[in-house]
Amino acid sequence: MTGNNPQLDANGGLQNAIVFISDGLGNQTFDPPSQPVVLTQKGCMYQPHVLAMQANQRLEVVNDDPTSHNIHPIPANNREWNKSEPPNSKTEETFSRAEIAIPVKCNIHPWMHGYVAVFKHPYFAVTGKDGSFDLSSLPPGTYTVEAWHERLGTSTQQITVGANETKAVNLVLKPRSGT
Ligand SMILES: [Cu+2]
């Protein structure tokens, strides 16, 4: 692995991957949480770099910097919007459709970019520094678990979880040739 590669820890854990259920939930519908998810612009960076949320959940975008930013998601399946944010302000928006993942940029600072992934269900997680994730709220069933990373693409695995059962899932994302 070279310095150009994504954020791996000493054990090969991959940060900022999104792990989610891509099949097995049937026609269930899920209300969005009443709490918003928060995307902060701080030090001319998006924090977190990768954020996951439910469709129709509120996305609160905070500008924590003494400078103006704008937030410009470039979705493929959702409505595009572009909002400027004066210093120390906040704004709120939603996305109504599932989309993995929407690139987000600031038109003022070209290096600022991030991703927002939108799900129709609550069974998703963004991996931490050590690559770990927790989908323990998942009800018993057979599912496809998928991992997505901005540069490494996707990987899927079938799992079956019984009642009161804990399963360890290890998803491997490999660099595509040429990266
Ligand atoms: Cu900016």
Image: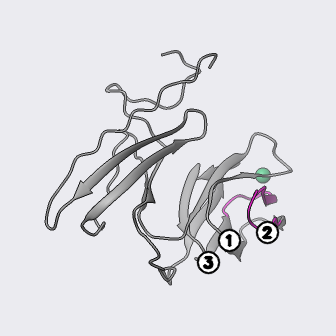
Between 132 and 142, the one nearer to me in the picture: 142
151 sits to left or right of 77: left
Determine crowd level at label 2: few under 14, some 14-19, many 20+ residues with C-alpha closer than 10 A.
Answer: few
Question: Which amino acid, by three-letter code, is at mark 3?
Answer: Asn
Q: State the residue position of label 3.
A: 56
Span of residues in magenta: 63-81
Kind of element beneath mark 2: loop
Q: Which residue occupies 59% across, 73% down? A: 55
Residue 40 appears in view: yes
Kind of residue indicated by mark 2: Arg
CB under 8 Å between discs 2 and 1: yes
Residue 50 coordinates in the image, percent (x, y): 57, 51
Q: Which residue is mark 2?
A: 79
Seen at 54% across and 70% down, the residue is: 120
70 shown above or below 30: above
Residue at the image point whose x is 25% and y is 55% from the top: 160
Sequence-first disc among 3 and 2: 3
Magenta-highlighted stretch: main secondary structure? loop
Real-space Cα distance between discs 2 and 1? 7 Å
Residue 66, percent across and down?
A: 74, 59
Which quarter of the rendering shows the C terminus?
A: top right
Q: Which mark is residue 95?
A: 1
Q: Is residue 97 left or right of residue 17?
A: right
Q: Residue at 40% across / 46% down in the picture? A: 128
